[in-house]
C-alpha cells in the first residue's frame, strides 16, 4: 500500500509505523492549495525519518529531467508527473504522452552527463557535493 499526500516527517513516521510499503511525497500539484509546502524541501527529512525500507515517490511540479535528478539525488525512489503527461495528451494523444516521457528521459540523461555521473546511483553518491539545501526559511511577521 502506498500513501499519497505526505508532506511532513511526523506523518511519514506514523504511516511507516502503520506498515505502508511506500509514500508519495506530494502536495497534489498544489492545485487547490498553491502555497503549501514544496515536496522537495521536506523529502530529505522524510527519508531520514523512515529510513531505506520504504519507497519514496515524489510529485508536484516535476517539469523536466533536472527535477527528477534533484529528487532522486535527495533520495526519492523516483518521481511521478501529473499535468505534463496531460499536456502531451491534449496536444497529440498517445504520441504526445510518449514525447513528454522521451523529453524527460533525454533531459535526465543530459543532466547526469553535465553533473559528471553515469547513473542514478552515482548521482546519489555525489549528491552532497552537487545539491545544496537552502537554510529553512524563518517565519516572517506580518507587515514587514
Ligand atoms: C486533473 C487532475 C486531477 C487530479 N485528481 C487527483 C485526485 O483525485 N487525487 C489525488 O490525490 N491527486 C489528484 N491529482 C494530483 C495528481 O495525482 C498529482 O499529485 C499532481 O498532478 C502532480 O503534480 P503536477 O501536476 O505538478 O505534476 C490530480 C491532478 C490533476 C491534474
Image (cartoon, rainbow, N blue to C red):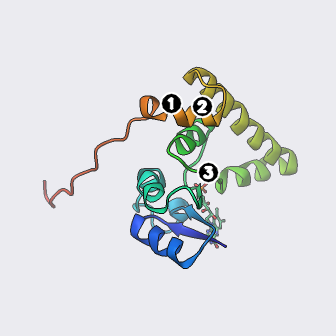
Give the residue drawn at x 83%, y 47%. Answer: 92
Give the residue drawn at x 55%, y 64%. Answer: 28
**Some atom of ligand 1 lies within 8 Å of the CB belonging to the residue at label 3:** no
Q: Quadrant of residue 65?
A: top right
Q: Which residue is mark 1?
A: 126
Q: CA distance from mark 2 to mark 1?
A: 6 Å
Task: Point out the tag, 3 or 2, that comes first from the N-terminus.
Answer: 3
Residue 45, placed above or below residue 127: below
Residue 36 lies, in percent from the top left, at 41, 62
Task: Point out the tag, 1 or 3, that comes first from the N-terminus.
Answer: 3
Q: What secondary structure is marked by label 1? A: helix
Q: Residues within 10 Å of mark 1 (few under 14, many from 20)?
A: some
Q: Which residue is mark 2?
A: 122
Q: Residues within 10 Å of mark 2 (few under 14, many from 20)?
A: some
Q: Which residue is mark 3?
A: 77
Q: Is the Cβ of the residue at disc 2 closer than 8 Å to that at disc 1? A: yes
Amino acid at each position: 500500500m502506498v500513501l499519497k499526500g505526505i508532506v511532513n516527517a511526523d506523518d511519514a513516521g506514523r504511516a511507516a509505523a502503520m506498515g505502508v510499503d511506500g509514500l508519495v511525497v506530494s502536495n497534489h500539484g498544489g492545485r487547490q492549495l498553491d502555497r503549501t509546502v514544496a515536496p522537495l524541501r521536506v523529502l530529505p527529512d522524510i527519508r531520514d525519518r523512515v529510513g531505506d525500507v520504504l519507497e519514496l515517490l515524489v510529485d508536484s511540479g516535476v517539469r523536466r529531467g533536472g527535477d527528477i535528478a534533484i529528487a532522486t539525488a535527495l533520495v526519492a525512489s523516483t518521481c511521478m508527473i501529473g499535468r505534463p503527461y496531460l499536456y502531451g495528451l491534449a496536444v497529440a494523444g498517445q504520441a504526445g504522452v510518449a514525447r513528454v516521457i522521451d523529453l524527460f528521459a533525454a533531459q535526465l540523461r543530459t543532466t547526469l552527463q553535465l553533473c559528471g555521473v553515469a547513473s542514478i546511483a552515482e548521482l546519489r553518491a555525489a549528491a552532497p557535493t552537487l545539491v545544496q539545501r537552502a537554510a529553512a526559511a524563518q517565519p516572517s511577521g506580518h507587515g514587514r
